């Protein structure tokens, strides 16, 4: 219901940009991805487990166009990113490496997980800190 209020406001994005669907009931479709927003705060690991239980993953940003969809989101949400301790690079849950055109990482505190905070930026965060999260399913 909160999601509906967020996206019922006029926004410079089109939800009809490309074919979308089908998504699970109560999920939102945009650019061939299905999204479910959760307002409860959980650790990164708990959030990841919740998404996995719904056959989805934590939010992954594929391009700047994908980020247009999240311009209206006002709080921080877990990303499906984790830092690799050996070399400091960032890796998505699916094993792919974060590319420079996907997101700019900002080091805010000592953490190996990341939250999305708008303005095309991800912020480092302690993985045990509670944050809201977004699950996504890629429509193939």
Image (cartoon, grey):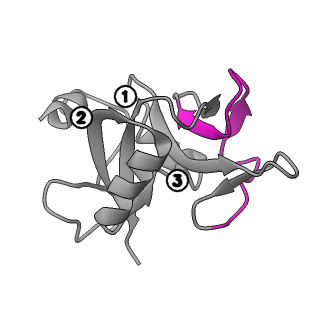
Q: How many angstroms separate mark 2 from mark 1 (CA)?
A: 7 Å
Report whether 43 appears left or right of 6. Answer: right
Circle 1 — which element?
Answer: loop
Q: Nearer the viewer, mark 3 or mark 1?
A: 3
Of pointers 2 and 1, the one earlier in the residue sequence = 2
Residue 56, percent from left and from top: 37, 64
Q: Position of residue 93 (x, y in %)?
A: 57, 61
- Percent x, y of residue 11: 32, 31
Residue denoted by label 2: 7
Q: Mark 2 near mark 1, Cβ–Cβ under 8 Å?
A: yes
Instruction: Give the position of the C terminus as an image quadrant.
Output: bottom left
The residues colored magenta run 95-116
Point out the tag, 2 or 3, that comes first from the N-terminus.
2
User: Is residue 97 covered in magenta?
Assistant: yes
Hey, which quadrant is residue 26 in on the image?
bottom left
Label 3 element class? loop
> Does residue 67 belong to the magenta stretch?
no
């Amino acid at each position: 219901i909160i999601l509906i209020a967020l996206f019922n406001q006029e926004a410079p994005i089109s939800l009809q940009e490309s074919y979308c669907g089908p998504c699970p009931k109560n999920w939102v479709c945009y650019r061939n991805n299905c999204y479910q927003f959760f307002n409860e705060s959980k650790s990164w690991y708990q959030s990841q487990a919740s998404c996995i239980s719904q056959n989805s993953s934590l939010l992954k940003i594929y391009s700047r166009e994908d980020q247009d969809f999240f311009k209206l989101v006002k709080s921080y949400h877990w990303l499906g990113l984790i830092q690799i301790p050996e070399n400091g690079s960032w890796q998505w849950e699916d094993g792919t490496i974060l590319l420079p055109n996907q997101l700019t990482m900002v080091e805010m505190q000592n953490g190996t997980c990341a939250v999305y905070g708008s303005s095309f930026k991800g912020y480092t965060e302690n993985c045990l800190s509670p944050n809201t999260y977004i699950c996504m399913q890629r429509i193939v």
